[in-house]
Image (tube, coloured by chain):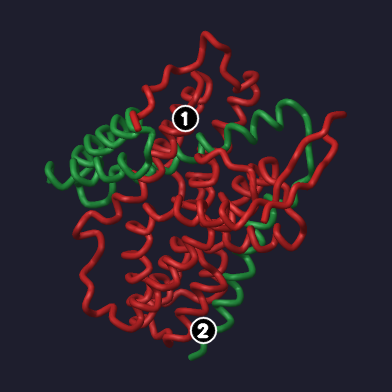
Chain colours: A red, B green
């Protein structure tokens, strides 16, 4: 069932949608290719958590309430190395700071009630943001579908890892960690539509490469992405003029 | 030893960072809107640059496979085609 909410924006009627069940299912399916990268690391987290002394319940509770793969993996590694709660929580804050940018971008793109905002925030991950932004969608239902797809994959994999993890070899040995940069590269290719956006992407990549040598990993993304987006914004409008638009490959024949 | 305090602390700060972005005031300046529009491509590029080379000394192979993935995505306009192409190129070149 589609719900349309009419809203006034800059003096003209603008239709915003909460979206439909169909939008939610489309969002769920759109995130399926990323399961290939999510599942092995969810299993790895479950296995590492058990090794670090977590019960099956505690490991699952972390995946449900924190739902942040990088932070969770880092947390169990730090715990195994003897780090305290305060240090691990601080590290979690730093590694997740980039999510502030995601919320800023999403707020402008989709109308959210306070409850929907809280739900969307809890389930927000790099992958969910990437799929939603690349798809150019504007409904909460689609966003929720993407987020729930990632949530289901991560939590199912965590459970598998805590119960059967000893049977699974290290994901890095098989290059499964390569899926993440590949997934974001495809989203980048599909999102760039102007020379200005291409320039911002190139600047962000250069800054990330440079920052990686000097900054902790959790700050690299925030500094590189925030700085390059700010530079691009300061230099003028990002929309393509007809002569500046990057030509796109012809659509696949049906 | 219970890990519940650790889990609670991590959940709190993670939710706070995610919710903070949604709560930043509704700015409508042209520069702010341009910034918001550019955040996705900037973020995607930063993530790729920071992680494409990996940590196992396979940087050149991975960059080459990533190039194959980019070309496949460009022509197919399908993310899953690019991911599969990149993984195949990586497996063949390893």
Position of residue B65 measured from the top left corner of the image (x, y, whole percent): 23, 38
Q: Nearer the viewer, residue A62 or A84?
A: A62
Left or right for B77, reference B9: left
* Image position of B81 (left or right of A131): left
Residue A213 in sight: no
Residue at mark 2: B3
Mark 2–mark 1 Cα distance, whole angstroms, equals 40 Å
* Residue A176 seen in render: yes
Near-viewer residue (B55 or A101): A101
Residue corresponding to mark 1: A201
Q: Quadrant of the N terminus of chain A?
A: bottom right
* Residue drawn at the location 33% of the way across and 29% of the way down: A253
Q: Is residue B83 left or right of residue B35?
A: left
The residue at the point 32 percent across, 33 percent down is: B70
Looking at the rendered structure, the secondary structure element under dot 1 is: helix
Task: Give the chain of mark 1.
Answer: A
Whether labels 2 and 1 share one chain: no
* Label 1 environment density (alpha carbons within 10 Å; few <14, some 14–19, many ≥20): many
> Where residue A108 sits: x, y (%)?
69, 41
Give the camera-side residue of A225 and A14.
A14
> What's the residue at 57%, 70% (across, down)?
B10
């Amino acid at each position: 069932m589609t719900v349309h909410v009419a809203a006034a924006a800059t003096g003209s009627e603008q239709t915003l949608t909460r979206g439909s069940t169909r939008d939610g299912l489309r969002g769920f399916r759109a995130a399926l290719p990323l399961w290939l990268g999510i599942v092995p690391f969810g299993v790895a987290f479950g296995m590492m958590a058990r090794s670090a002394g977590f019960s099956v319940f505690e490991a699952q509770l972390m995946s449900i309430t924190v739902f942040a793969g990088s932070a969770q993996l880092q947390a169990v590694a730090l715990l195994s190395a003897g780090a305290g709660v305060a240090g691990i929580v601080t590290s979690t804050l730093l590694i997740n700071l980039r999510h502030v940018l995601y919320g800023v971008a999403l707020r402008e793109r989709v109308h959210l009630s306070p409850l929907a905002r809280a739900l969307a925030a809890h389930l927000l991950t790099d992958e969910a943001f990437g799929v939603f932004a690349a798809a150019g969608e504007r409904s909460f239902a689609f966003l929720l579908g993407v987020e729930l797809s990632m949530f289901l994959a991560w939590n199912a994999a965590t459970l598998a890892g805590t119960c059967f993890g000893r049977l699974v070899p290290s994901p890095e040995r098989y290059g499964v960690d390569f899926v993440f940069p590949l997934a974001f590269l495809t989203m980048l290719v599909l999102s760039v539509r102007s020379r200005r956006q291409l320039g911002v992407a190139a600047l962000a990549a250069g800054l990330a490469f440079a920052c990686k040598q000097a900054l902790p990993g959790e700050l690299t993304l925030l500094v590189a992405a925030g700085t390059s987006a700010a530079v691009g914004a300061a230099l003028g409008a990002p929309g393509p003029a007809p002569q500046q638009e990057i030509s796109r490959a012809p659509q696949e024949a049906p | 030893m219970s890990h519940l305090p650790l889990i609670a602390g991590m959940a709190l700060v993670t939710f706070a960072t995610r919710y903070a972005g949604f709560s930043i005031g509704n700015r409508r300046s042209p520069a702010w809107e341009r910034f918001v529009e550019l955040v996705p491509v900037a973020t995607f590029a930063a993530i790729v640059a920071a992680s494409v080379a990996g940590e196992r000394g396979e940087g050149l192979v991975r960059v080459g496979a990533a190039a194959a993935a980019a070309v496949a995505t460009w022509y197919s306009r399908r993310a899953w085609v690019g991911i599969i192409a990149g993984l195949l190129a990586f497996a063949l070149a390893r």
